[in-house]
Amino acid sequence: MNATMLLIFDALLLASIIGLAWAALASADARRSVILFIAFGLLLAVAWGRLLAPDVALAEAAIGAGLTGALLLAALQWQPRKTADTTNSEQPTHTLLETGFRWLVTLLCAALAGMLAWSLTQIDAGTAKDALANAVAANIDASGVSNPVTAVLLNFRAYDTLLELAVLLTAVLGIFALGPAQAGYRIAGPVFTSLTRWLTPLLILTAGYLLWVGAHAPGGAFQAGATLAAAGVVLRLAGRDQIGLPRGNALRIALGAGVGMFLLVGLALFALGRPFLGYPPAWAGALILLIETAAMLAIAATLVSAFIGGQPTEEKTRC
Amino acid sequence: MLTTQWLYALSGCLLLALGLRSALLHPALLQRILAINVMGSGVFMLLIAIAYRGPGMPPDPIPHALVLTGIVVAVSATALALALARRLTREQPHD
Amino acid sequence: MTDALIALVALPLTAALLALLLPRIATALVIFSGLAITASAIALLYGVNTAGALHYELGGWTAGLGIALRADGLSAILLLMIALVMFAASVYASAYFGKASERAQFWPLWLLLWTALNALLLSGDLFNLYVTLELLGLSAVALAALSGKHAAVQAALRYLLVGLLGSMLFLVGVALLYAGYATLDLATLTQVVKPGPIAWSALTLMTLGLLLKTALFPLHFWLPPAHGSAPAPVSAVLSALVVKAAFYLVLRLWLDVFADIVTPTAANLLGVLGAGAVLWGSWQALRAERLKLLAAYSTVAQLGYLFLFFPLLLALPPGPARDVATGGLVMLALTHGFAKAGLFLAIGIVQQRSGHDNIQELGGMVQRLPLTTFAIALAGVALIGLPPSGTFLGKWQLISAAIATGQWLWVAVTAIGSLLAAAYIFRILGHAFGNQPYPHQAVAVAREEWPALLLTLTATLVLGLAGAHVWTLLENGS
């Protein structure tokens, strides 16, 4: 009975996810697409929770749906929107060749999905598919944390995470190179302003909690960084140009903090005769927390910078 | 694989195909960026389904870590794509 | 010796951070770290040559649970090419970007691109390769858009979307392999992978994604606008190194990891696409009106030659004959790397001095820019494949292997491609050496002219004359 209920839940959830993705991508209206996409992200977070991946669920809700959603909503401001008064005659008409091409692409995509599904049927149950999971479990005591996902991200595969922080840094530097940030929004009304007054500290507290708890429970630097960034986004929406984001050199330090701390720890250990990024087990927990704190700051600064769409203009000191 | 894994893995394949089709065919830039994100979600679903071991069993943490990395890479790429697109629409012919 | 593996990633990444924090001394930092990276690449090549393939387990975790860095003869040779080309282009860029604010934006992204190239060549882990591909893609796109001009931003956006599509296809392959074999370590995978739907599908998806990134015909559509509108030093490394990094991965997958999976039919398909690239790319280069577009289409063509090797290598039995042909392939990739980087740098000088790069209006260029024109001519020698360039040796092996395996079609394609290359090179030189008065004040800057000249000299003379070492290094480093 329980299994049947769960099966029905799975089917409904997946049908909604696929339906939302379809609707978001089929629409010609940018606003509609973005809102459907955000809903799609939130349901994905439910799916990750259902598959016992709470760390991913948190990240999806905070980053996948949350911050990406905020970025997309901000993008709607300049996106040429299909207005409602354009009649249906605007529906693009395709020549025979174009229609043929569309069908060809559709068929190829279907073939690809089919090929993938067929390959999945060929996975033999006999292979040692738990070999790596077992290796993680066997070494977790030496990793400095008890949450296996954090252990993989910050210890066993820390090098991936180092390069991933470099990807974030690259993206924000690429955005900065494209020009200065946009002007802020209008100053919000009193209700929203008072809302931000308690929402902001709450988000900051949550970020700190997520960072701390990541060592042994779902959470970690990325979820915490995204939550911290959300505080910046809220302040920005309230019309503040001062959104807690430092300027100039301090901002550059914040953006590079994640990669910098990682390298510092990695190279210091290397200089002491240990492997690059090889933490001594006794110190691993503390070093991971140190790296995660720096990473959280970098992620938050990066995401807020991306949201405001460029380098904040250097403030003229006029206090 | 378990039935649950099958359901989610197949849905992942479907999302991948949906995203790929729109990424290649959709006329609007914003939707093409969304489509690539949907493709990514499809791959993530495949990975999380692979990691699942049934109710009450601890899942394989490695695909979870990979997906977390993937989500951050995806938001980086999306942010850069949106910034480029904004620059394109804001751009006045002064070059 | 394994310290060099770490240094090749940690040095450019540390330098990127320092260049971000200390923009005033960034140029000096880049030159200093460039020298250190080049020294590390030489040390790695030396180590691989004496001790064979090297590997390093990051964090001290065994590969599989952790990530391993690996280097063999092939990757060590390419890493040295990357170091030399990036270093020469860095010297050039220090003069090319006149304003301090431009350099402040340029250097950190430039060093991140360098990090990505080195990390990709060294990675021994499937998922880590995906991350390096994304790092490479995003830094390349950010650099390509740097001028902020409409055409550049538009081309960069298309480049980004195509690149992301490619990475996604690659990542699906990674997921499938993890589902099938529960490992991400390339060396482990090489041993356990078996012919079957999982391996075939994964290889197809990953290859498709990488072909998009390496711009193999007919997936090359994004390359000419992106390489043609980026700043000159960026165009140089995009054409010489970035597309080649994706090609390197295809080579690695087909010849190493999936060596037991690939079939001659599939290799023939790559060969046919390569032939299409040679013919179409050369033809478009001949028709191009701008120098930079000519150089970009020539890249499409030159990448085609590399893919012609796949059906030949698959037809040769593993052993000395195949190794000799592989050496020819590496030689061709190396020569193109040096020659094309030098060509783009030289074109950048022409473009800055003349204010345009229209081939028709470059008459008499040799009078004012003799060294630059000479560099273009040298690059031309290498692109056509005249002796003593490395291309000559590479094409020689290509043709020998084609004759030995009775695949005459590729001989014809190589011949036609070389004739077309001669035509498009002599078209430039015909204008440049013309006796019309050159209307522009052209002041030559040594920091710009010498890198271009040294790179093209390497392609035409050094590689051609010292070519035998490449084969030795490949053999010792396996």
Image (tube, coloured by chain):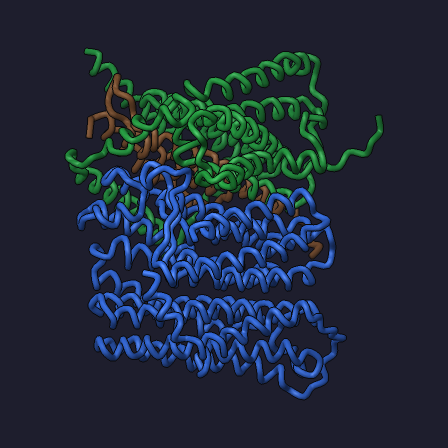
Chain colours: A green, B brown, C blue
Specify the farthest residue to the bottom. Answer: C435
Q: In the rendered view, would you say C213 is above or below C129?
A: below
Left or right for A183, reference A153 = right
Q: In the rendered view, would you say B5 is above or below C175?
A: above
Q: In the rendered view, would you say A104 is above or below A301?
A: below
> C258 and A12: which one is in front?
C258
> C93 and A288: which one is in front?
A288
Specify the farthest residue to the right. Answer: A318
Q: Residue at x 28, y 18 (%)?
A: A9
Q: What x and y, as percent, mark residue C435?
A: 67, 88
- Asked whether the viewer can see residue C100, the reply is yes
> B70 and A188: which one is in front?
B70
Q: What x and y, as percent, mark residue A301?
A: 61, 31
Q: What x and y, as percent, mark residue C132?
A: 45, 47
Q: Residue at x 74, y 73 (%)?
A: C443
Q: Quadrant of the C terminus of chain C?
A: bottom left
Name the quadrant containing residue A45: top left
Q: What x and y, as percent, mark residue B95?
A: 69, 57
So how many labels did they put on this image?
Answer: 0
Name the quadrant containing residue A80: top right
- Asked whether the viewer can see residue B20, the reply is no
